[in-house]
Amino acid sequence: MDGKIDLLSMTIEELENMLTQMGHQKFRAKQIFQWTNKGIKDIDGMSNLSKDLREQLKERAYINRFEIIKKFVSNIDGTAKYLFRLGDGNIIESVLMKYSHGYSACISSQVGCKMGCKFCASTGAGFVRNLTSGEMLDQILTIQNDTKERIGNVVIMGIGEPLDNYENVVKFLRLINHKDGVNLGARHISVSTCGLVPEVLRLAEEKIPVTLSISLHAPNDTIREKIMPVNKRYSIDKIIEACKIYTEATNRRITFEYAMINGLNDSKENALELAGRIRGMLCHVNLIPINTVSDTGFKRSSKDKIAIFKEILERYGVETTVRRELGSDINAACGQLRRSLMDEGQLVF
Ligand code: SAH
């Protein structure tokens, strides 16, 4: 935006430095932070700042703003899917899910993705750019302001690979965790990754003990390489080693995501092999009936096969859940809506 800086992407310390440079007092930083983190979009609405300071701020800064292009609400379970247009015209999506314990938002971390997982809807169109920390935060703020509901859980599981946008994601975690902002505890935040080992190890050191979800999807490297090119860089052994270091540093239980794909990774042998590798770890497995994406050729495993897989893992003491499907009538699974509109030629880049 004309060389201007987005206030939503700024920490209190960065705001303090900017205010000092502008010849204003530091304590104003907290006031500005509180306004932006409430979702206010107009600098003139910051009523406890002087007119002079507001004018100066407008000259050098703006507040990120999304256009809600579309909002789909499921008739089945109230899940809401948002399609946002970013300031530069790019499009991302976020999902709001309602659980008995409150609202949870699934947000995107990049426009597109570089990882190339074969079953994933987000990868087809390739990678465009990273989201800024303000753009990640604004997915939460815009949904909260739209629904007037407080979001109590955030999962970074939408479009993109969060650990491939490490700096901005960690900055976002600090922003959303801040007591003067949304004030969301690390325990209420999950980061989902395809397993970028060096970044998992870095995250372990950040002192923000978020839940780490690892998209494993296979019991061995041979199967994983068929569906996830990233496995050529980081093998399952290396990922498991990094997970152990993460739990040691944070005391948090790892979630292994496992998309059940018919005939590929869903046999009894696959379950046994997986159990053998992860039993005894502080972890649990979340089985995901895969969402069929056009042209990928992957089909979802039957309910029976999923139940047998779960039973075998549990027999070995590995806690296992099957992901409840939400918003199936509105294409709510990550990346699916953007992708289906692209397939229909409705999204042009
Ligand atoms: N890049 C990150 C986060 C985004 S993907 C990651 O890999 O974890 C979020 C989750 O959805 C991942 O577990 C991903 O593997 C899974 N996923 C992607 N496409 C899917 C599909 N068609 N059906 C079910 N799960 C899918």
Image (spheres, rainbow, N blue to C red):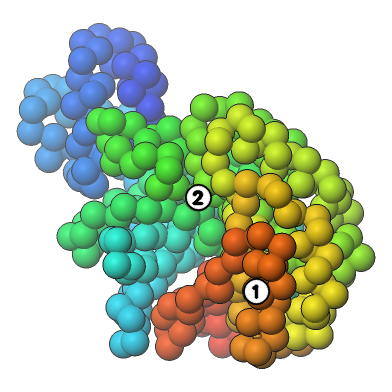
Picture quarter containing residue 289?
bottom right
Q: Residues within 10 Å of mark 1 (few under 14, many from 20)?
A: many
Find out whether the residues at labels 2 and 1 contact each other: C-beta distance under 8 Å: no
**Location of mark 2 (residue):** 190
Q: Quadrant of the C terminus?
A: bottom right
Gap between marks 2 and 1 measured at Cα: 22 Å
Q: Residue at 34%, 87% (x, y): give it.
A: 76
- Say what amino acid the circle numbered 2 marks: Ser
Q: Is residue 82 left or right of residue 323?
A: left
Q: Which residue is mark 1?
A: 310
Quadrant in which residue 72 is drawn: bottom left
Circle 2 residues within 10 Å: few <14, some 14–19, many ≥20: many
Whole-percent x, y for residue 238 in the image: 82, 44
Depth check: 135 or 250 in front? 250
Considering only order in the chain, which callout, 1 or 2, is on the residue closer to the N terminus?
A: 2
Question: Amino acid type of disc 1?
Answer: Lys
Direction from residue 23 to residue 245 in the image, left or right = right
Q: Position of residue 108 (x, y in %)?
A: 50, 57
